[in-house]
Image (cartoon, rainbow, N blue to C red):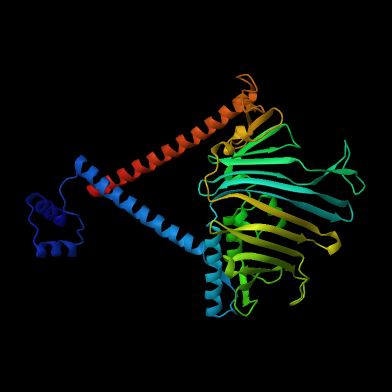
């Protein structure tokens, strides 16, 4: 009790000599001698700690973002490559990305032919046409294409090797703007689909030409996604194709070196453009590979001081060359890095040939929102109170409930921290 009485005397008088404090500490009196804690001091202390927490969060977020960016931009190399080869490959790759990112906006069209020589189903051949308006900085796109495909005359039966079919080349239209994608397929005239822009499949990106697969020329792989895929694979070789070093060959493989070998030829003299791609597959035994079963060749032209693709010749097969799928496409550019007409990037300009339901897929359940007519006018397709309209309200209410729960949890945690802090200071 003596130690406690001494502490009270020191607290009341404000006298606290060093020797006395040392004596008290030796007697294991560990009381903190502070003035009484009032509401104002608690609030000031909370403000100070909140500012500190916010500053720490900002610093952590900045460091984390830098680490993510550095990890995303870091290439993977075979340990056998020396430092000079690695530096050269890095310089080439990032110069290629910078050159491709110079393509910011434009308008182009293209015509060509697709041939699918399937021995089981028969030969498919038909014309290909594309039309694209794009503005990458604004994440806006309009992409139209006709792509031949097999339409099986199944009726109510199942598709077999003997099922008759005929060729169709339906018009497909995709418009991406304001963070959403509108898709319409003339062969499926029931509806036009609204999706999140990131979830939309058809995002034609000319910057991917020369790196993408054959399906990419019908609009599937954004350049950023494709570049990250390459950066996650292992570079196993880099070499000059000619004496001057105008064309450089780079080889990528999977990390186990047991699945594929992808070789890209870059034309350094023409904006580091990818002009040829070959892909071979591992047969199973050591260093035993198939011949190149995927071969793409792309030519480029310079317009407005920017290199843009001009022609594409692609060939892919899985078993024998006799069953290869081939594509030949010639592009014509109307605009490069120029302003795109705003009217071409609206749902109303999607160019439907008959009235179409607009289906919103951005909620937890698809919802019919409008009936769109060829002249661009809209009207509600169903009267208020219908089940499909109520589903949209249910989705909204579910989202609001989630927000309310999260806010309440944050308030409870904050109140708990404040109470704990006040009690700790009063001890």
Q: Is residue 272 visible?
A: yes
Q: Is residue 232 left or right of residue 11?
A: right
Q: Identify which residue is drawn at 84% across, 50% down.
A: 124
Q: Quadrant of the N terminus?
A: bottom left
- Specify the quadrant of the image occupied by residue 42: top left
Tally of marks: 0
Q: Position of residue 198 (x, y in %)?
A: 58, 46
Image point (15%, 57%), residue name: 3
- Residue 115 locus on image (x, y percent): 81, 54
Q: Position of residue 39 (x, y in %)?
A: 21, 40
Q: Nearer the viewer, residue 281 or 57?
A: 281
**Is 235 rendered above or below residue 129?**
below
Is residue 187 toward the left or the right of residue 412 in the image? right
**Residue 232 visible:** no
Please report the residue visible at 85 percent of the width from the left and 59 percent of the height from the top: 323
- 227 relative to 38, above or below: below
In the picture as drawn, the residue positioned furthest to the right comes out as 162
Camera-nearest residue between 209 and 319: 209
Judge by depth and name the residue closer to the eye, 248 or 369.
248
| Residue 45: % across, % down | 24, 47
Q: Tell me which corner region of the image, top left, top right, bottom left or bottom right, holds residue 176.
A: top right
Left or right side of 297 for 157? right
């Amino acid at each position: 009790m003596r130690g406690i009485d001494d502490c009270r005397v020191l607290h009341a008088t404000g006298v606290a000599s060093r020797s006395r404090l040392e004596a008290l500490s030796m007697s294991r009196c560990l009381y903190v001698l502070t003035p009484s804690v009032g509401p104002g001091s608690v609030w000031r202390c909370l403000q100070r700690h909140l500012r500190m927490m916010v500053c720490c969060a900002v610093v952590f977020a900045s460091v984390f973002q830098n680490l993510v960016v550095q990890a995303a931009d870091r290439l993977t190399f075979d340990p056998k490559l020396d430092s000079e080869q690695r530096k050269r490959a890095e310089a080439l790759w990032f110069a290629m990305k910078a050159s491709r990112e110079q393509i910011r906006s434009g308008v182009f069209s293209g015509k060509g032919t697709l041939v699918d020589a399937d021995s089981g189903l028969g030969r498919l051949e038909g014309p290909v046409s594309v039309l694209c308006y794009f503005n990458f900085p604004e994440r806006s796109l309009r992409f139209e294409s006709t792509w031949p495909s097999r339409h099986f005359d199944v009726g109510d039966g199942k598709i077999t090797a003997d099922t008759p079919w005929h060729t169709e080349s339906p018009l497909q239209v995709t418009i991406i703007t304001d963070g959403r994608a509108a898709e319409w397929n003339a062969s499926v005239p029931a509806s036009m689909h609204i999706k999140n822009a990131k979830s939309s499949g058809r995002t034609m990106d000319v910057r991917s030409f020369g790196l993408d697969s054959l399906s990419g020329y019908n609009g599937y792989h954004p350049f950023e996604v494709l570049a990250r895929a390459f950066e996650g694979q292992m570079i196993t070789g880099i070499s000059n194709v000619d004496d001057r070093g105008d064309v450089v060959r780079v080889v990528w493989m999977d990390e186990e070196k047991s699945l594929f070998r992808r070789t890209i030829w870059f034309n350094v003299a023409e904006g580091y453009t990818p002009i040829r791609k070959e892909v071979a597959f591992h047969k199973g035994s050591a260093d035993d590979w198939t011949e190149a079963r995927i071969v793409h060749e792309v030519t480029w032209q310079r317009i407005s001081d920017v290199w843009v693709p001009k022609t594409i010749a692609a060939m892919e097969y899985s078993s024998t060359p006799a069953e290869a799928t081939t594509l030949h496409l010639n592009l014509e550019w109307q605009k490069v890095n120029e302003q795109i007409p705003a009217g071409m990037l609206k749902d109303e300009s999607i160019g439907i040939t008959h009235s179409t339901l607009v289906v919103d897929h951005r909620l937890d359940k698809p919802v019919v929102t409008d009936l769109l007519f060829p002249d661009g006018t809209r009207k509600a397709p169903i009267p208020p109170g219908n089940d499909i309209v109520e589903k949209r309200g249910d989705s909204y209410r579910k989202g609001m409930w989630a927000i309310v729960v999260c806010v309440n949890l944050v308030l409870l945690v904050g109140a708990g921290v404040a109470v704990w802090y006040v009690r700790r200071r009063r001890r």
